[in-house]
Image: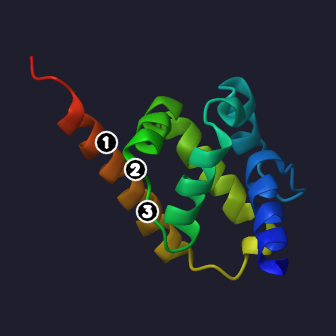
Amino acid sequence: MASLNVYSVLVVLFLTCRAVMATKENDQIIKENNCETKMGLPCVLEAFRSIFERGSISNKCCGELVVLGKVCHSALVKRTLENPLFKDLSLTTITAKNIQTWNHCLAMIDSLSPSA
């Protein structure tokens, strides 16, 4: 039960945190592109798990992630990494998982698109 509460706090931080250490550049990108409103919470959780934990992302959520866009996706991940709660995470590992998740979703969306 406690882990659910901790996880809920992490998700809220992922979505809405205005951490003091967050760069103005990422915050500006997120604000200008309305990044925090483009994905539903269930898909945000899946994307978060696939990047920051050990989880997978569904086809539906891949679609939402691709619609979110690479600029928003990258800015949200960077802002999350700037949060002191995530200071002990391996930047190399998270960056690799971030790229892997994005590329997986692009490939999945491309495979579902009708051929021209």
Q: 2 or 39: nearer the eye?
A: 2
Q: Residues within 10 Å of mark 2 (few under 14, many from 20)?
A: many
**Residue visible at 40% across and 56% down in the picture:** 101
How many residues crowd around disc 3 within 10 Å: few (fewer than 14), some, or many (20 or more)?
some
Q: Which numbered marker is on residue 12?
A: none
Residue 47 visible (yes or no):
yes
What type is the residue that disc 2 sits on?
A: Trp
Badge 3 or badge 1: first in the primary sequence: 3
Image quadrant holding the C terminus, namely top left
Q: Is tag 3's residue or tag 2's residue first in the polypeptide sequence?
A: 3
Q: Which residue is mark 2?
A: 102
Question: At label 1, which amino acid type do we have?
Answer: Leu
Give the CA distance from mark 3 to mark 1: 14 Å
Task: Write down the residue under mark 3.
Answer: 56
Check disc 1 and report the residue beneath it: 106
Secondary structure under badge 1?
Answer: helix
- Which quarter of the picture shows residue 107? top left
Q: Indicate the position of residue 1 as horizontal and vertical percent values.
A: 82, 77
Regarding residue 84, the answer to whether it shows in the image is no
The kind of secondary structure element at disc 2 is helix
Look at the numbered discs 3 and 2 and tell me whether their residues touch, using CB distance below 8 Å: no
Q: Position of residue 43 (x, y in %)?
A: 57, 46
Three-letter amino acid code at the position of disc 3: Ser
Q: Residue furthest front?
A: 1
- Real-space Cα separation, disc 3 to disc 2, in angstroms: 12 Å
Residue 73 placed where, x, y %? 55, 44
